[in-house]
Image (cartoon, helix red, strand yellow):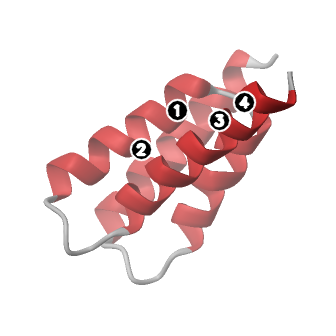
Amino acid sequence: MEDAKTQQDAQLKKLQDIASDTGLPSELRYKAMEQLGRVGSHEALVSLLELVANEKLARQEREAALKYVAEILKSKH
């Protein structure tokens, strides 16, 4: 079970790294954000919130991350 958690954490970290890498095409960053939103876990939510707070990202990217945060929150209630 610990191995699955470690793998999931590594996958979430990879998605967050892709989403915040301004050297990558924006389409790829948006796809990573979308994947984080689909995971919907607490850890994915935290990752998305970190993207929202990342001032190096364009405003539209931060707003997209915030949209996925809202979707996760809505799905939990």
| Residue density around tag 4, few if under 14, some if 14–19, many if 20 or more, within 10 Å | some
Residue found at the very far bottom of the displayed protein: 56
In three-dimensional space, the C-alpha distance between marks 4 and 3, rounded to whole angstroms, equals 14 Å
In three-dimensional space, the C-alpha distance between marks 2 and 4, rounded to whole angstroms, equals 13 Å
The residue under label 3 is 7
For the residue labelled by badge 2, is the local secondary structure a helix, a strand or a loop?
Answer: helix
Q: Amino acid at mark 4?
A: Ser
- Mark 4 or 3, nearer chain start: 3
In three-dimensional space, the C-alpha distance between marks 2 and 1, rounded to whole angstroms, equals 6 Å
Which quarter of the rendering shows the C terminus? top right
Say which mark, if any, is on residue 37.
1
Depth check, front residue: 53 or 47: 47
For the residue labelled by badge 3, is the local secondary structure a helix, a strand or a loop?
Answer: helix
Residue 57 location (% of width, % of height): 36, 74
Depth check, front residue: 11 or 68: 11
The residue under label 4 is 41
For the residue labelled by badge 1, is the local secondary structure a helix, a strand or a loop?
Answer: helix
Which label sits in the foreground, 4 or 3? 3
Residue 53 shown left or right of residue 6 in the figure: left
Image point 65% across, 35% down: which residue?
7
The residue under label 2 is 33
Q: Amino acid at mark 3?
A: Gln
Image point 68% across, 43% down: which residue?
9
Residue 17 shown left or right of residue 22 in the figure: right
- Mark 2 or 4, nearer chain start: 2
